Image (spheres, grey):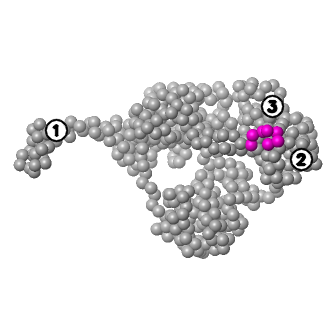
Amino acid sequence: MESRIYLKELSSYQKATVAQKKRVGKSPYYDLTWLPSQTMREEMSEFLRYRGNEVSISTIYGECNYYKKICRFIQNRAQGVVSFRDRQTDIWLKQFKVWMLEEKIPLTYENKGVYGNLSMVPTHIIGYLKRIVEFTEKAADDRTELEKDIWEIDKLDIFIRENLVQNIKTINFTRIPQHCIREEVKKGIFLNLQAEAITCVQKEMTAMRRFTSYLAEKEKNVLSCRDITRKVLEEYLIYLKTENTSTKHYHSDLNRLRSILESIGKIYNYTNLNALFLNRDIPPTRPAEFKTYSDSELKRLNASIVKLDEQYARVMIIHQMLGTRISDTLTLEMDCLYKEGPEIIIKIRQVKTKTYQKPISKELAELIQKAMDYTREKYGKTKYIFVSDKNPDRPLQYRAIQDKVISMIHREGLLDDNGRLFGFGTHMYRHYYGVKLTEMHLDDFTIAKLLGHSSIQNVKYYRRMSNQVLADETRKVRQMLSDIILKNLDGWEPEYEQIRQNAGY
């Protein structure tokens, strides 16, 4: 077996940009001889090759410093250990933290979240050791993926309806405390995965974790889904309204809980789950609160957005000019533009619904073309215009753009018209676009087509938001009607007479 793993041998190096390759140098490597046993060297070699498929070469290069410290720790505190599997993960981490304190290596650091919240989190080297140990444990696990408590999505032998802009890699069942219920949920989730999007299934998992945590605390005798009665559910509904404070809106959560329990009922023929929920158990959905930016708010935001890295600035401006959902903007493909006579048409493959086309301006088309050129020059041939830096085969991730924009807002202290810091309101750009269409006096059918809606049902919300143009354009008419009424107030009650006099009649 080789004693060194050179970074240029890893798959992420082959996908790296010229700038990334220059940053890591000519021949950086991991020296496996620093590990005390042949088995640990083989495990580390496998881990590095796996890591080379998961993260950028820059990340692997930076992690080399973590590796060196971990090797020092093993040489000092793990003599006689042959494999990373010889100790449980928590034992490894406990001993490593003691060694770090002796070496005066910080255990935590202050992390500032995208919304400005400060918290103390474990330093990255601890997470790195945890990844190595967990990887070797998984590699030695000969169970099928469905038998495990953490599923890796890409190892399931079914088609997964994934969300391209949210990188969901696993489904974790470990937080369901009841063993029997955990196994039942696995089968129910596997069934639902074949018909639902992964994001919907994740919401079912969240609902089930909340429910089973309640059962572990309040209903300890419920160890299987066949033990769930109408009385148990009613007690849970009361608990949600009176004691639980994690969320105040349970419409979606309870719908997802009903969905997974009904699937489990079908698989196991648990008749108690067939009519467990009544319609009145599910609270109505919250009325949609349609918000939009004012012109002045949009100017303030864009004045800072254009200072971002050029491709991030382009995606945000293009997102505004198209009026699309953020998922649709981030998944624009390289073949999305074409000409039809004198018009330039864009093809938008909506993640939630169907593909549609609409004409765009020459200026917007040129901006999109510049974004395409940037991606080709930096990443080569790709499917998407905006791509993930870590994996150019995937579109730019929602979290990456969110972090950039929120950091910009907090850094520059950008406030809305009410004096509050802006949030990451990507859908408000779509609302702004829709409102402007109504102010142009377009008919509902045209507005729906430009927004990619399948019907005109939602256009009324954009018209309701457009109160300013209604006020401006009807001001003269309203004043004329007021004048007519005021002139005819003679003989009315004293308060109306006072109004007439105040108006100068």
Answer whether residue 236 is magenta in the image.
no
Q: Which residue is mark 1?
A: 480
Quote the CA–CA distance across marks 3 and 1.
78 Å
Which mark sits nearer the N-terminus, 2 or 3? Answer: 3
Q: How would you classify the magenta stretch by its main secondary structure?
A: loop
| Residue at (24, 38) in percent of width and height | 474
Q: Which residues are magenta?
A: 101-107
Quote the CA–CA distance across marks 1 and 2.
90 Å
Q: Is residue 475 left or right of residue 221?
A: left
| Amino acid type of the residue that numbered disc 2 sits on in the rendered structure | Ala
Q: How far across and how far down the image is residue 260, in percent?
A: 60, 63
Q: Is residue 449 above or below residue 174?
A: above
Q: Element type at marker 2?
A: loop
Label 1: how many Cα within 10 Å (few below 14, some 14–19, many 20+): few
Q: Which residue is mark 2?
A: 78
| Residue at (87, 53) in percent of width and height | 86
Displayed quadrant of residue 201: bottom right
Q: Which mark is residue 8?
A: 3
Q: For the image shown, how many numbered marks are present on the structure?
A: 3
Quote the CA–CA distance across marks 2 and 3.
30 Å
| Residue at (51, 46) in percent of width and height | 354
Q: Does residue 316 show up?
A: no
